[in-house]
Image (tube, helix red, strand yellow):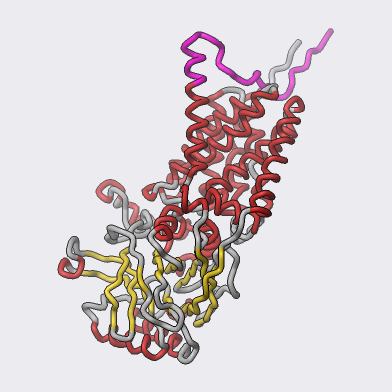
Amino acid sequence: MQTTPRTGRYRWWRAAAAVPAGALPALSFPAPALWWFAYVALVPWMLLLRTAPTGRRAALEGWLGGAGFILAVHHWLLPSLRLFLFPLAALLGALWIPWGLLVRRLLGGAVAAGRASAALVLVPAGWLLSELVRSWQGLGGPWGLLGASQWQVPPALRLASVGGVWLLSLLIVAVNCALVLLVAAPSARIPAAAGVTGCAVLTGAVWLWLPGPAPAGELRVAVVQIGPRGVSESVEQRFDTGEQLTRQLAGQRLDLVVWGESSVGAGLGARPDLARRLADLSARVGAPLLVNVDARRGSAETGGAPGIYKSAVLVGPEGPTGDRYDKMRLVPFGEYIPARAVLGWVTSAGKAAAEDRRPGTAPVVMDLPGAAGGAGVRIGPLVCFESAFPDMTRHLTREGAALLVDQSSTATFQGSWAPAQHASLGALRAAETGRPVVHATLTGISAVYGPSGERIGAPLPGSASAARVYAVPLARGTTLYVRFGAWPVAVALGALAVYCAGEGVRGLRGGPLRRPAPEPTGPPAHTARG
């Protein structure tokens, strides 16, 4: 007689396990910052997917794991989005359905050497496809890309200068895939070991033989962080706090002073008194100020649609220089509601934007006025989570920016992982472009990175209300990433296209599609003799 396993309970256990398995990679990012964990964090999820009894189950477990990943990486949004974060995670989690199917197809059952070799290329490519789609600004942007977990690892940062954060994501998933093969597919251990060795050799070769950025002088940049106390005050008091901190910088031979996002709460055209005070500050410290104006502008000022803009504005001793950058990529739900007519109810379910801010139309590269050593230096401003977009810093670098400046505010998320995650992105952008990055925030964490992604000086923590001067090294030349762009994405998509075409041709010819051998769906059955 044969006993029947309780497959229903077993399957629900698998579905429940997929959520925490997908969430594990979040520990690789700040604040835990267990960068090494990224290279093993996907193994439990992939082991689950490869043993899925059907493609439908693999799709479900890929979806649930993706939702778990989004929830874990963005959990700090819960106080703002509240329960809306869960359907949002479910929506974005669906991007991992194809990856779940791919893992089952290539790693399931008995894996021969040829299929293992293909898996080491195609499984990372499938992951990168998920990252690419969710990197669209309308879906929240490229926050939490797996490669960004390596922001403090010098060899990985050097690799980012070759292929950007995308190449790091491919490398990390390839190592996880090789470990799954080593654990679960004895017949594929040779290509798996070769895959791990190849990743290590590639990283080592780039680290040893690719030259780093060539030095090209230095700028003295002051970061003014108003701090949590200043943010809790009125807009006028916030400006006063920034003014007081900036006055302390007089006599320190500066090239640039940077304030954080939303540091000025009124338009300088409408408030000439604020413009005069900023000009006086510039004259006092002997350097231009890059402030951030979060205010309403009329049609006469915008030359187009009136509304609320977030703008980086350069101010010299004579007043605003005329250089202004309006933030282009706004935060969904935080700064505007996508399809407000349909999703406007979100404002009652969380702290979503009551009114849509207006986006800018083009990036801007600014020329520093003749300061101590800054004459002729061009800066590329970004605002807030725009530092998550590799293409923006690449564009600014190609347009001649020698210094990249991100003005940010994570005041709403103090005490969470968000400030540390945001600050860490500056290291990736610096390494990719070979240009230093100043990440200046309203409330912390403010940090500065050199052209190789190395941290310059001590960051300003969230509790600090201070002005600090950093000696920022400049660099000349260009990186391979700036020159060729996101070529790893093109290679990954090309590999997936070839694979899908091959499977399609195989199906049209009536040949068997490559499917994994069936896996047991529950405990092994026992036969009783009597």
Quadrant placement of the C terminus: top right
Number of marks in picture: 0
Q: Nearer the viewer, residue 165 or 420?
A: 165
> Can you name the residue that lies furthest to the right here?
530
Q: Is residue 423 above or below residue 226?
A: above
Q: Which residues are magenta?
A: 502-530
Residue 290 in sight from this viewpoint = yes
Q: Is residue 136 above or below residue 45?
A: below
Identity of the residue drawn at 75% across and 30% down:
190
Quadrant placement of the N terminus: top right
Identity of the residue drawn at 59% across and 58% down:
151
Q: Is residue 514 above or below residue 451?
A: above
Asked if the magenta segment contains residue 503, the reply would be: yes
Spot occupied by residue 446 in the image (x, y as percentages of width and height): 51, 71
Q: Quadrant of residue 208?
A: bottom right
Q: Quadrant of residue 431?
A: bottom right
Q: Is residue 82 above or below residue 95?
A: below
Spot occupied by residue 52 in the image (x, y as percentages of width and height): 61, 27
Q: Nearer the viewer, residue 489 or 101?
A: 489
Spot occupied by residue 30 in the image (x, y as percentages of width and height): 59, 59
Identity of the residue drawn at 50% across and 79% down:
220
Q: Judge left or right: residue 133 versus residue 293.
A: right
Asked if the magenta segment contains residue 311, the reply would be: no
Residue 40 in sight from this viewpoint = no
Q: Nearer the viewer, residue 214 or 50?
A: 214
Does the magenta stretch mainly form a helix, a strand or a loop? loop
